[in-house]
Amino acid sequence: MKGLAHIGVLQALTERGLLPTHIVGSSVGALVGAAWSAGHSVAELREIAVNLRRKDIFAVAHADMAFKRMRSPALFRREPLDTLLERLVGDITFHELDHPLVVNTVDVNSGMQVFWGLEGLDEVPVREAVFASCALPGFLPPREIRGRFYVDGATVDNLPVGTALVLGADVVLAVDVSASNAFRADVQDEGFASVFARATEIAMQSLLEIRLRSWGTPPIYYVHPRVEHISPFSFDHLREVVEEGYRATAAALDHPDEWPQPGDTGVYPKRGVIVRVQRERCIGCGACLVQAPPGMFVLDAQGKAVVTRPEQEWSPVDGEFIRHCPTYAISARPAATPAATRRQSG
């Protein structure tokens, strides 16, 4: 449900007259993008989102689990989501949308990533592709399209920025609502669905970090709405989620000096930080040597970690190694002079 933050993102963009040349979405991001591209206004989407109830999307598949047991295709039935998609999108194809849309899915049998809406993959009903993109394995059943079965593309690519290489984008606004960096309490006591969802979050975030670590062009501006404290299946914070998507995007647009310029590469915004190790906490396990970029840390004669380059310029996806320190000995704080200012003056 955190994907409803994308409605706030669209509100912030459209208020400023900034229309995306393409929308590429996974899961609820694909659903929001499809509904907007099909002609719903942001105001309509906000109203629909804040009034959603659990029964509108999730209905436990009691019959399947009773009779099929471990062969049940999913925990939840497909009918509620199908009904919602019929309401939001109807039977139109990608050609009939007001704005170009690409939907990220994965063939569950071959592992092939398929982007519906690209050339040659744009003649299927939009709602079929969106359902497949929302079908997180185990929670919603795979969707059959053209004789093959598809699930949520986030299983291999939670933030599908790679399609920008096909679409010829000059800059990518990447909105990430994942939450693996957030600490969770007592997931192990909340049942198998919560444990599986949490494990999926961690796997998705790890794949994303690997992909973005070596990203070149087109440059990405990364927005991360602060919704990590909200459960993926919570219906108690829908208005908050939408508002946070708006806040995070508006804040980004209010700082044009931090956006990439023509010819820039990598992920933005980039800001100066100072990395430190608290020696009294360091146990010399070497996790930082494994997780951080090569050469960033060394162990001194006492077996303590030392930062070789304390002052650095980081994008939002840098520094993931900090959370892998088992004693929380590594920290990073903003440098006195913002990296964006240094870049302008240079």
Image (cartoon, rainbow, N blue to C red):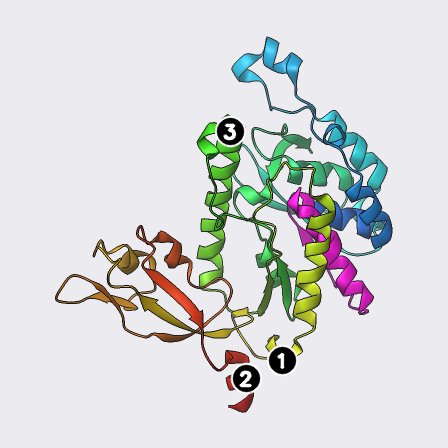
Seen as rendered, the residue at the extreme front is 280
Residue 132, located in which quarter of the rendered image?
top right
Real-space Cα distance between discs 3 and 1?
Answer: 44 Å
Q: How many labels does the image show?
A: 3
In reply to whether residue 193 is colored magenta, the answer given is: no
Secondary structure type for disc 1: helix
Three-letter amino acid code at the position of disc 3: Glu
Question: Which amino acid, by three-letter code, is at mark 1?
Answer: Asp
Q: Tag 2, which secondary structure?
A: helix
Q: Residues within 10 Å of mark 3 (few under 14, many from 20)?
A: few
Label 2 amino acid?
Thr
Please give the residue where the numbered disc 1 appears in the rendered image. 257
Task: Report if residue 158 is visible in the image.
Answer: yes
Mark nearer the N terminus (1 vs 2): 1
Disc ID at residue 190 = 3
**Label 2, label 3: how many angstroms apart (C-alpha)?**
46 Å
According to the image, label 2 marks what residue? Answer: 341
- Residue 248: image quadrant is bottom right
Q: Of marks 2 and 3, which one's residue comes earlier in the chain?
A: 3
In the rendered view, would you say 143 is above or below 92? above
- Give the residues drawn in magenta, as a range: 1-28
Q: Residue sitting at 67 percent across and 30 percent down?
A: 144
User: Is mark 1 in CB contact (under 8 Å) with mark 2?
Assistant: yes
